[in-house]
Structures are given as structure tokens and as C-alpha cells.
Image: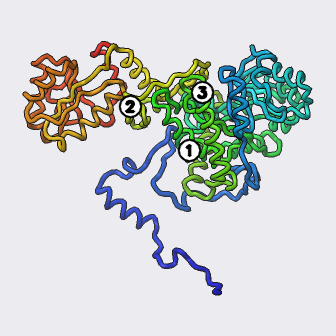
Amino acid sequence: MSDAVMSLAGDFDLAGRDQWMALVEQVLRGAPFDKKLVHTTYDGIAIQPLYTGADHAGDPSLPGVAPFTRGSRAAGGAWQVRQAHAPATGNEAVLADLDGGVDAIELLVDGSSSVDEIDRLLRGVPDSVPVMLGPGSEAADALVGLWGRRGVTPAEARGGFGADAADPRVGAAVSRSLDYPDVVAAVANGARLADQGASEAQELAGSLAHGVAYLRACEDAGIDLGEAAAKLEFRYAAGVDQFLTMAKLRAARRLWARVTQVCGIEPAVQRQHAVTAGAMMSRRDPWVNLIRTTVACFAAAAGGADAITVSPYDAAIGAPDPLGLRIARNTQLLLREESHIDQVIDPAGGSYYAESLTDALAATAWGLFQELEAGANLTECIEAAHAARSRDVATRRLPLTGISEFPDLDEPEVERPPMKGVPGLRRLAEPFEALRDAADAAPSRPTAFLANLGPMAVHSARAAFAANLLAAGGIGVLGNDGFDTPEEAVAAWAASGSLIAVVCSSDEVYQENAAAAVAALKEAGCGYVLLAGRPDDRWGADGCIYMGCDAIAALRFLHERLGL
């Protein structure tokens, strides 16, 4: 057997960035490189189309070693499958989750919950199962009371008190938790900031600020900072951008290690709990949520989260049903037990893109954290990020499948029992869902007539675009195969009974017939005439719908014209 090493790239000439750029310029044909190929995040971080070793200096640290960018476990290991339950889901659902492979239960209860209420919800749950109270629940007295009732000693107790890390009173919860070796005292809830619209760097900076406030409160209470750091858990949102999620979790560990180092203690491992982002969930076409949460769960696992919670696909509607809960837990189990994501140490490590994005997020978040320490207002920053993201949703630059893109007006309605929502949550789909709700409440489906000019090959692209946009607002379309003359289109509109017409065709046909079609429709009594596309001349139309227009504003105006 030969000892020669086979080089897979040995028969190919080495290519550099300059050669790649030369080929790109041929394709762009003078179009701006940055406009066509570079994407900017809501933190102002430029996402390039190509990354090389020159984009990342390299992180010499190893997994399990400070600053823990590459993970807190040197040998990998399974993350904790943690699923959330409220009284609305019931004890049977809790037991089904545990029988199905869930490792820990998060209780969504508040301070008014009694020992009896929690006991009923956890009836039959082994004492060895960690029970984590949801962030800010203030139900620690009830949980401790339940442990006492069941004879669980402090050394046997598993779970968390869920105290708010930013609450000045958190020192009391930490002092209490010191008697319970395996109980987490508090949560720095970055996911709550993401629910409100925070960008990734804002979520990181805000969670760091909460963590520092927590350490200050513990110091004031006379608690050793090393012990206090070990009693804190960070909660982050995992979204549909898998690379941003992975980079965020990697950057978070690096940042917290730096904070603890500056505080004069050994750089601490950040305990991370990733939850699928509530803002990305939709009530309409909720089955798309299965895809969203799967991507988010994979990203959280690959990013090194210690615990993950996947929301059921129907969580935005109400109390999830058994199918939603089963798929939520199985999403994690398939990734862990069959795909073995947990067996790979830092899957993103070494990727020039992931490493560069981690560096950029860490630097941006640290800069914002310093501004917050100097008195900057995080709420104002979040509002600006939320406004920018909302604009992208409205213009469909940030498309929402099943909501703003490819909505199904005939989808079956999914109903669930009501359940208390997450305070401050602003779901991206809400503006479009409100339009759909208003349209569905009408006595009959509101419609718009498509005045398609020319054969199908000429008008079909813009007709399909118009139908898709209108459906996002709950408005159906009266379609056809096209008309040879404006007069034929007007006659068909008059027979349709619709109050609105949308002229659809190519720019060439618009030059010949758009003005005549628009004028004829208005003369026949059409109350509102739209033109599909963004031509140089509107030819007398009342408005235009086109790629990049404010779809929400256009649909709201149409609702007004339709009396919805």
C-alpha cells in the first residue's frame, strides 16, 4: 500500500478572490456589486457573498476552554430537551412529553399559582425531572413548597426559580438557591427583547446588561460572584436565519466570559437556553411553523445551546394540541438521536462565514453594551430595529411564507383553546393576519377583477403577482385567460360585480392599451383601478402594485375601498 497522501485539489489551479471577482463582474455586467450581492443585517453588519481565510484571524481557543466561543463542553454532549407547559395544556400533556423523550419541563405559571395547582400539573412527574419556572414567574415559593410536600431534599431538587436577572430583588432568589446545588436562580431573558423586535446584537447587549445588573445585585447581597454566575441562565431566541442564530450563541458565550473576567472572577461558562423565536410564528398557515422551528432548532443545537425549547406549530393560535406537542419534541429528538447534531463539536467552527459573523456580532454587541452602561436607551434601539424589520415585512423584502407570500385563502381554519400570550410579543405576521381576519369576517369573499390584456404568455406573470399580493390581504381574484381589447375586459368586469379592477400585462402591451383600458374601466363605473407593475407612466390608474411596494399599505387602502 502506498503511503502517498492524495490531494483532492492537487489537479486544479489555485484560484483567488481576484479571479472570482473577475467572473462575478462578467455576470453583473456593470450592476453594483454591493447592491446585488451584499446583504446588511439590522445591526449594520454586511453579509458578503464569499468569505476566505482573510476574513477571520482565527480563534485559538478550544471547545470547553475560555472564552467558550466553540462551546462549553470539550467533548460535545446532548443538549437538554426542555418543553414548556401551562395549566392550559394540562397534566396529561406533561406526562406525554416525558414519556416521549423530553428531559425537562418549563412551567409557564405566575406568582398567583399555588402549591396545589402546580402539584396537579406535575402529578406523576418523577422528582428527578428538572422543573424550570418560566422567566419572571415569581412562583418559587410554590415550587419549593411542592418539593417539601413530596419530600424532595435540597440536594435532590432539580430545576430553576426563573427569577428575572434584571430585578433588583434577584439577590434573594440567588441566596435561596444556594441551598439547592442543581437549581438555577435567575434568567437573563434576551429572548424577551427579541420578541419585542430587537436585532441580534441588541439581544446580546441587552442580555449582557441584565447579566451585569444581576451580578451587581448579588454583590450587594454579599454573594460570591463566582457562585452567582453559576446560578444564572441566559435565554436566547433562535430564528429562521440559521447562521445568525449560530453566530449569536457563539458570540454570547465569548461576551459573557469577558464580562465575568472583567468582574474579577474566573471566566464563566454561559448556561444557554435557546427557544424558537415567538416573533416568527404565524396563526395563518401554521404548518409552515414546522419548517421555521426545525431550522431554528438545528441552529440552536449547532450553536451549542445547553437546553432548547421548540414551540408547537399551533402555539400562536392557543393551547397546543397533542399533535403540536409531539412534533415539537420529536423535532429535537430527531436532530439529537438520529442526526446526532450533539456529537459534533462546534459544527460552525472553521467556517469563514460563521467565524466572521461571530466576530462581527460580538464586536457590535460589545459596543452597544458599553453604550448601555453609559446610559443609552435600549428601548429606543429596539424600536428602530423593529421599525426597519416591519418595513421589510410590509414591502415583502422579508417574505413570510403562507402569509405575505403564497397565502392560501382556502386553508382550513385551525382552532385551539385560548391561552395566555407572551407579554410584549410582536409577531411579524400580525399586520397581514389582521387583514385576513377582516376579509374573512365579510359576508362573502371580497374580490378584485383581473383585467388581463393579451394572451396568457404576456399577462400571466403580473396576474400571478397581483393574485398573490391580494390574497395576502384576504382578497380573492376573478381571473381569466386574457382579453384582446380593452372593451372586452371592461365588459367582463361589468359582469363580475367587483368594485376593483387590476390591469395586468407586459410593458409593451401597456404602451398600446393601458391608457384605454384604465379610462374605459373608470367610465364604466369601476371605483378603483390598479396597474400591476411599476411602469414609467401609470396611464391614469389610481395606483400601482409592484415588487417592493408597501403591500400592507396598499391592502389596507383596498380594504377601505371595499368597506371592510
**Quarter in which the C terminus is drawn:** top left
**Residue where numbered disc 1 is placed:** 244
Circle 3 Cα neighbour tier, 10 Å, few/some/many (<14 / 14–19 / ≥20): many
Q: Position of residue 149 (x, y in %)?
A: 89, 21
Between 355 and 243, the residue placed more toward the observer is 243
Q: Earlier in the sequence, mark 3 or mark 1?
A: 1
CA gap between label 3 and label 1 equals 28 Å
Q: Which residue is label 2 attached to? A: 408
Residues marked 2 and 3 touching at CB (< 8 Å) = no
| Nearer to us: label 3 or label 1 | 3
Q: Secondary structure at mark 1?
A: helix
Work out whether residue 519 can be spotted.
Answer: no
Instruction: Indicate which disc residue 320 carries.
Output: 3
Amino acid at pointer 3: Pro
Which three-letter amino acid code belongs to the residue tagged 1?
A: Leu
Res 312 seen here:
yes
Callout 1 touching callout 2 (CB < 8 Å) = no
Q: Amino acid at mark 2?
A: Asp
Q: Residue at x 37, y 52 (%)?
A: 33
- CA gap between label 2 and label 3 equals 22 Å
User: What crowding class fits label 2: few (fewer than 14 Cα within 10 Å), some (14-19), or many (20 or more)?
Assistant: some
Identify the element where label 2 is drawn. loop
At 88% from the left and 28% from the top, the residue drawn is 222
Q: Which color mode does the image show?
A: rainbow
| Image vertical order of residue 221 relative to residue 533, above or below | above
Q: Quadrant of the N terminus?
A: bottom right
**Toward the viewer: 297 or 512?**
297
Horizontal side of 95 relative to 300 (left or right) equals right
Q: Residue at x 24, y 37 (%)?
A: 462
Cα distance in 3D space between marks 1 and 2: 30 Å
